[in-house]
Amino acid sequence: MKLARILAPAIAAAALAFTGNAFALEKFKIGYLRVMDDAQAMAAYEAGLYKKYGLDVELIEFKSGTDLVKAIVGGQLDSGVFGFSNAVAWASKGADLKVVGGAQLGYHALVAREDSGINKVADLKGKTLASQAEGSTADTVLKGVVLRDAGVNPDDVNVMGVSPQVAVQSLVGKRVDAAFLFEPQARIAQLIAPVKQVYEIGEVWPFPCMVVITSGETLKKKRDAVWKSLDAQRDAITLLQKKPAEASKLIAGYFIAEPTLKTLKHGEMLREDVIRDAIKSQTFTAKINKKDQDRMQEIADILQSQGSLKTRDGKPFDVNSITDLSWQNARKL
């Protein structure tokens, strides 16, 4: 009996240690950009979905897709949600990258100041436009699709490569005539500045703007963790699609610091209402289908024609070489 009393605490401690180890969360680092395209990464974090799947995620913000992809290539990140164009440009130079899941179909709105005289894309000739950095997904589709289809030479437009937040400030300060923006910045601009939307590329040229990317090395060593992160983001996408108001409460603070937004025509608006409407405008998807892959190839071809992407042998870049869709196939999406 005495021996049992002596051993009982030790047995209990051992059982507790075993239980703790059995349910220990695996550390995992995910990079994101503060745009609505990356909402599923933020929502999965705020809703505790990564923990639900056994991951202790550190969510790290980056100012550009270029900086984010550098972190993945350098091993500082396990995965990231960002524009496909950055991934394909780096992969063409030999970077070991893999596109493993979908995120969002491209929403880029052209908003123009009401006093600019811009009512359609063709009116951008001779105007100043705020967009993103050269070689970014926004820049690629702006020059390779939007301006091309309107018969506008990119050299005829003064394009400023800035962050979406700076683009909005530039519209307010009359430093630019128009801006090519993601959500929620496109919506915020229309609420706080005298601007109107004249074009949205997702309505005429849907494309997989944001995708989930990891390195080949990480996928090889931590495939289970990568898949868990994709499971969590898939659940977050369902939340965004089916309960935008609930999702907005989780992520509104990422985009609007104050509880309300002072607008030109609607007074003070709750930030949750602004972000809820921005969520509703998006098409989130965890799956990359054949049509998406064809669009990705088209984007790669545009990059190559612009000189932003150069392969070692000079041949067209094959996007299939960097896609690994085993997760979505296993989940039967």
Image (tube, rainbow, N blue to C red):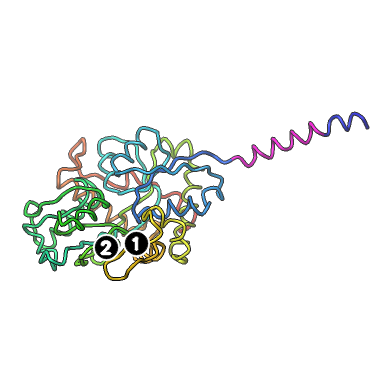
| Quadrant of the image occupied by residue 171 | bottom left
| Quadrant of the image occupied by residue 125 | bottom left
Classify 10 Å Cα crowding around label 2: few (below 14), some (14-19), many (20 and above).
Answer: some
Q: State which region is magenta.
A: 9-24
Is residue 181 left or right of 77 when viewed as pictured?
left
Do the numbered discs 1 and 2 sit on residues whose CB atoms are within 8 Å?
yes
Q: Residue at x 25, y 48 (%)?
A: 163
Residue identified by numbered label 1? 261
Secondary structure, mark 1, is strand
The circle drawn on residue 192 is 2
Q: Residue at x 15, y 47 (%)?
A: 305
Q: Position of residue 54 (x, y in %)?
A: 56, 45
Q: Position of residue 129 (x, y in %)?
A: 15, 55
Can residue 139 be seen here? The reply is yes
Q: Is residue 332 above or below residue 217?
A: below
**Amino acid type, mark 1:** Leu
